[in-house]
């Protein structure tokens, strides 16, 4: 196909899908010609082409705001998400190819072949800083249109959360359906305080079809960018949202509010009510109590020479009955036995998951590294061929042994299902590793200190 035919096809596509105005098509055709003759290749070339064909950020903002006002939050996010797929910022065609399975223990496992494995918590503290341009980090709004990071086709929309300026954008390599981030317009470090709970509730008031949550603001238990305040959310019901309360507790100040310990491998307290203020008040009391809680016998040290270690990850959904705020208790303390974290995935599971167990995994959706697709296929073949595990695959000894038992026992006659169930089992045990209280008695002792009756 010659270059002019390509340009004409792209212009027609942009008119149909990207709201390109008839008056602008000749101008855009000339701009595309320049891009195609510039020497750009591959993804960078695509990024430049679709960035040029997309509406300007101001027009995207204006359209989103208009739809939000006239038709509501779901119609607005539907429009924006579809636009970001059509302008090729959200790589949906790639994402749809990622292996994914719900396992029998209630977790969801995905293998993300689109993103590299993230193993350096120091980068999270630095915020994945960006050299050059106006950007201080990879999620600053100044990235919109930034060619050096393939953000020419990135489009964001403005939000107000409790009267402050934020913006929303979708992740190009999302972990789940309509995965997006709400980002503070001010480049300020991640933190969780009373206002965080208020912001999260304000967000689901605007977009009740989405969940929204905040990573704990510490390395190893937080996200990959801790230098810039942001939340993660989107249009998926995560496994944690489906979990039930196993033990009700009563708040002495607000006994009418439903509060309980969640039936979950991690340590989670759920608060349910239609009163924003009551939920925020209870959640913040849990946060402040946990941040200074110490129990050396359980390995919980809130502060030492290495800094602060106790933090919470809140996440909220809106239901017909009001709000559900889940407060996940986290600790990033380390010791000689567990230098990567006492309440992190233990070493025997690192072949599967060594990255931080952040907000999304803590809610039961595990994003495993892309390398596993090939590595586990080889392990499966060894099992079905009846061959022993070679030395170069020794890190998968546990996976090999347990998957072989599932397969050889006849419990799972399909090796692929056996492997997915093994991954689900390992990820469940990783969540148990992250639990700061390993039994209900210790957790009840803590909540009594917060002001609950149990």
Image: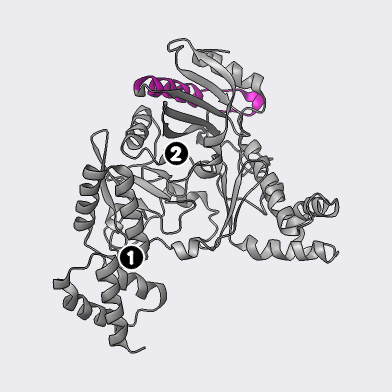
- Extreme residue in the bottom direction: 2
> Element type at marker 1?
loop
- Who's the residue at 47% across and 24% down the image? 271
Is residue 136 among the parts visible in the rendering? Answer: no
- Who's the residue at 51% across and 49% down the image? 121
Percent coordinates x, y for residue 317 in the rendering:
43, 34
Judged left or right of residue 451, residue 424 is: right
> Element type at marker 2?
loop
Percent coordinates x, y for residue 375 in the rendering:
68, 63
Question: Is label 1 or label 2 in front?
Answer: 1
Q: Which residue is labeled 1 in the image? A: 87
Is residue 16 among the parts visible in the rendering? Answer: yes
The range drawn in magenta is 277-301
Q: Residues within 10 Å of mark 1 (few under 14, many from 20)?
A: many
Q: Residues within 10 Å of mark 2 (few under 14, many from 20)?
A: many
Q: Quadrant of the C terminus?
A: top right
Q: Quadrant of residue 390?
A: bottom right
- Who's the residue at 27% across and 81% down the image? 8
| Nearer-the-camera pick, 310 or 280 | 280
Q: Does the stretch in magenta take in 298?
A: yes
Above or below 371: residue 331: above
Above or below 22: residue 179: above
Q: Which residue is labeled 2 in the image? A: 217
Percent coordinates x, y for residue 234 in the rendering:
42, 46
């Amino acid at each position: 196909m010659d270059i002019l035919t390509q340009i004409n096809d792209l212009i027609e596509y942009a008119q149909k899908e990207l709201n390109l105005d008839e008056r602008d098509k000749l101008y855009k055709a000339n701009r595309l010609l320049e891009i195609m003759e510039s020497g750009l290749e591959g993804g960078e070339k695509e990024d430049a082409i679709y960035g040029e064909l997309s509406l300007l950020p101001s027009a995207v903002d204006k359209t989103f705001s208009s739809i939000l006002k006239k038709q509501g939050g779901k119609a607005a996010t539907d429009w924006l998400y579809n636009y970001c797929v059509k302008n090729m910022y959200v790589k949906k065609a790639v994402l749809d190819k990622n292996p994914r399975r719900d396992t029998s223990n209630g977790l969801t496992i995905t293998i993300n072949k689109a993103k590299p494995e993230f193993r350096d918590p120091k980068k999270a503290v630095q915020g994945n800083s960006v050299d050059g341009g106006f950007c201080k980090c990879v999620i600053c709004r100044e990235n919109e249109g930034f060619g050096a990071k393939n953000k020419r086709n990135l489009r964001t929309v403005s939000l107000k959360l409790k009267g402050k300026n934020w913006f929303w954008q979708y992740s190009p390599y999302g972990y789940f359906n309509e995965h997006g981030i709400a980002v503070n317009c001010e480049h300020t470090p991640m933190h969780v305080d009373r206002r965080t709970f208020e912001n999260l509730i304000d967000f689901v008031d605007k977009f009740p079809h989405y969940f929204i949550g905040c990573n704990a603001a510490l390395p190893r238990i937080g996200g990959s960018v801790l230098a810039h305040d942001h939340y993660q959310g989107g249009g998926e019901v995560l496994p944690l949202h489906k979990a039930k309360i196993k033990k009700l507790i009563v708040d002495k100040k607000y006994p009418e509010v439903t509060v309980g310990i969640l039936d979950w491998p991690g340590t989670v307290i759920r608060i349910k009510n239609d009163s924003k203020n009551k939920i925020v008040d209870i959640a913040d009391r849990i946060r402040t109590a946990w941040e200074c809680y110490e129990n050396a016998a359980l390995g919980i040290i809130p502060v030492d020479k290495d800094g602060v270690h106790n933090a919470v990850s809140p996440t909220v959904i809106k239901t017909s009955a009001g709000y559900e705020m889940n407060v996940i208790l986290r600790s990033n303390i380390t010791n000689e036995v567990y230098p990567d974290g006492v309440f992190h995935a233990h070493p025997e599971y690192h072949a599967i998951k060594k990255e931080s167990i952040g907000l999304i995994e803590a809610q039961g959706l595990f994003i495993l590294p892309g390398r596993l697709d090939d590595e586990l296929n080889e392990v499966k073949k060894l099992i079905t061929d009846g061959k022993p595990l070679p030395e170069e695959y020794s890190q998968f000894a546990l996976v090999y042994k347990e998957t072989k038992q599932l397969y050889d026992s006849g419990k799972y006659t399909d090796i692929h299902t056996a492997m997915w169930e093994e991954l689900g089992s390992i990820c469940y045990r990783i969540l148990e590793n992250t639990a700061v209280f390993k039994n209900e008695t210790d957790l009840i002792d803590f909540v009594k200190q917060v002001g609950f009756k149990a």
